[in-house]
Image (cartoon, rainbow, N blue to C red):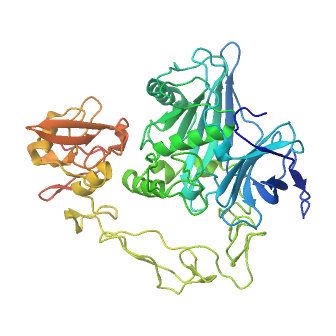
């Protein structure tokens, strides 16, 4: 009996013979593709699986500690047993399972999510299949006194139009594991029942230790120790690409889907997502539960919040991530990434909907000039002079197809210093028209406004939250002429994009400011190129305005 499940049916999956025999590469234990027949509520279904090549990053490491506390780091074989795929004949279905020791994972078929787990230790033994609502959501409480092992997973994240991940796929985000650290000797932070203190301890350790030796975008801490107030996870909002990008999670369930959805949920907070509420819709094939509730899909609210976060925060690690250098399999036809030597790549044969591309060879079909790109239309290059990227504003220039390529030329801008208007008069700078009004919206969202002049007079203090820049030794006070060229003060709006909010009160007026731990981002300052006085703009980084 499974104590963590209300009810389940016992099935015995059958591995089907591949239509085309594929030889395994040297040292490869698990095949690239595999099919199973599985009964779901009395009906047999065929699931098609492909090894998740983008799950484990190239250069992935595992770290543990010896009995004398010595750190031991290895780079294990990149072959693994984790797959994703679909249910044959079902639109919008998805499957994510491991076949390491039996089959364990989830199957989404139309409006239902099924969980599967082995009752034995092999794929041809009995398995339990049940609806996700039959999973008891908190069946294992961690001891508050004894912890056997804690572990840390560090990941690279990239925004992609070809994402293959299970829970984050709908958001066009790829998550790749680049490291796993298991604290076999002792815990290297104090793990408290107070989840907030544990999160603070973990993020401090990440900054002082992990980031110094392992490049990554986000780290998640997992412990068997229970947190108080029924908390199973905690993370800071808006923290992706910052030193606070991470979360703490309790391994609170016998079924790993419980932990997986907790980590996805906490990482969602790092991306600026809030808890789902009434009116949030998870899509036509959802039974109603969303990732920011539990545990199936990202809701319409999450999609909208992510779009706003990406525009407001502009997280740089997603633009030029280390992820691309760490994709495990390297160039490979069918991974939906255009690798060297390929003319096109539209995913697997089952996924491909592009008639211009032969999914089995990643070559263009007969008569096709192209398969992707903004200058490709109906498998042919668009005519020279066709607009492929419209102007995004008065400081941006349109781009035109050359007639010889499927790619749109690089983005071009108006000359810096050209007058522009973005709620108020400004000057073009790197294709944007930066203004105080725009930056207050970026920091505090809808309803935010620029603080009154009295707020900006605080910049004469030359202190941490009110200054005109920093040098090696101290903060630089602004001169009277440069008051609006330093720290920015706002009013109204909502949560700070940095996740932390500060404020001065001047003669009863609240002067809001974004508290930023990572001072190198300068997000709490008036942006470069902003008009900050008569015939005056905020200079580039490194220049000061204190004189």
Residue 108 locus on image (x, y percent): 68, 55
From this viewpoint, is residue 172 visible?
A: no
Q: Is residue 183 left or right of residue 438?
A: right
Describe residue 240's horizontal placement relative to residue 377 as left or right: left
Asked whether 204 or 237 is in front, the reply is 237
Between 65 and 267, the one lying in front of the other is: 267
The answer to whether 412 appears left or right of 332 in the picture is left
Q: Quadrant of residue 74?
A: top right
Q: Quadrant of the N terminus?
A: top right
Q: Residue at x 27, y 63 (%)?
A: 433
In the image as oriented, which residue stretches furthest toward the front? 7
Tell me if residue 37 can be seen.
Answer: yes
407 is higher (above) or lower (below) than 404: above
The C terminus sits in image quarter: top left
**What percent of the width, then of the height, locates residue 360?**
78, 69
Q: How many marks?
A: 0
| Residue placed most toward the observer, 458 or 310 | 310
* Quarter of the view holding residue 275: top left
Is 14 displayed left or right of 200 in the figure? right
Residue 78, given in percent of the width and then of the height, sits at 75, 43
């Amino acid at each position: 009996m499974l104590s963590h499940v209300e009810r389940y049916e016992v099935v015995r999956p059958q591995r089907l013979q591949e239509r085309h025999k594929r030889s395994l590469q040297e040292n490869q234990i698990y095949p690239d593709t595999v099919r199973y027949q599985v009964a779901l509520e009395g009906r047999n279904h065929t699931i098609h699986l492909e090894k998740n090549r983008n799950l484990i990053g190239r250069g992935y490491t595992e770290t543990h500690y010896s009995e004398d506390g010595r750190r031991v780091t290895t780079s294990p074989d990149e072959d693994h047993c984790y797959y994703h795929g679909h249910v044959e004949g079902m639109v919008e279905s998805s499957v994510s399972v491991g076949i390491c020791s039996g089959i364990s994972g989830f199957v989404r078929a139309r409006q239902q999510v099924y969980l599967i787990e082995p009752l034995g230790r092999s794929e041809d033994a009995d398995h339990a299949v049940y609806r996700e609502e039959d999973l008891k959501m908190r069946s294992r409480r961690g001891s508050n006194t004894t912890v056997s092992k804690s572990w840390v997973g560090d990941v690279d994240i990239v925004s992609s139009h070809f994402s293959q991940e299970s829970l984050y796929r709908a958001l066009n985000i790829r998550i790749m594991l680049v490291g796993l650290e298991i604290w076999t000797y002792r815990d290297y932070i104090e793990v408290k029942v107070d989840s907030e203190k544990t999160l603070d301890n973990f993020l401090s350790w990440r900054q002082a230790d992990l980031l110094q030796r392992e490049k990554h975008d986000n780290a998640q801490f997992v412990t068997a120790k229970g947190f108080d107030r029924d908390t199973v996870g905690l993370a800071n909002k808006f923290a992706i690409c910052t030193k606070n990008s991470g979360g703490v999670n309790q391994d609170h369930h016998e079924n790993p889907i419980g932990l997986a959805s907790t980590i996805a949920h906490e990482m969602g907070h790092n991306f600026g997502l809030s808890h789902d509420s009434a009116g949030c819709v998870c899509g036509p094939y959802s039974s109603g539960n969303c990732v920011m509730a539990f545990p199936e899909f990202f809701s319409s609210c999450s999609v909208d919040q992510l779009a706003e976060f990406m525009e407001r925060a502009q997280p740089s690690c997603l633009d030029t991530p280390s992820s691309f250098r760490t994709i495990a399999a390297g160039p490979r036809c069918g991974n939906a990434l255009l690798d060297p030597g390929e003319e096109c790549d539209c995913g697997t044969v089952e996924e491909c909907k592009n008639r211009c591309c032969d999914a089995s060879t990643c070559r263009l079909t007969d008569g096709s000039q192209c398969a992707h790109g903004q200058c490709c239309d109906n498998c042919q290059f668009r005519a020279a002079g066709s607009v492929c990227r419209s102007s995004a504003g008065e400081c941006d220039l349109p781009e035109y197809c050359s007639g010889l390529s499927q790619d749109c030329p690089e983005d071009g801008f108006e000359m810096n210093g050209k007058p522009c208007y973005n709620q108020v008069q400004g000057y073009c700078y790197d294709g944007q028209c930066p203004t105080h009004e725009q930056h207050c919206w970026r920091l505090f969202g809808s309803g935010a406004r620029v603080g009154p002049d009295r707020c900006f007079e605080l910049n004469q203090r030359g202190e941490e939250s009110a200054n005109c820049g920093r040098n090696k030794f101290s903060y630089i006070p602004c001169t009277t002429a440069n008051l609006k060229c330093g720290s920015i003060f706002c009013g109204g709006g909502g949560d700070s994009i940095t996740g932390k909010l500060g404020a001065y009160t001047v003669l009863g007026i609240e002067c809001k400011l974004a508290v930023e731990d990572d001072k190198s981002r300068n997000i709490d300052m008036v942006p470069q190129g902003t008009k900050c006085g008569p015939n005056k703009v905020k200079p580039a980084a490194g220049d000061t305005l204190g004189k």
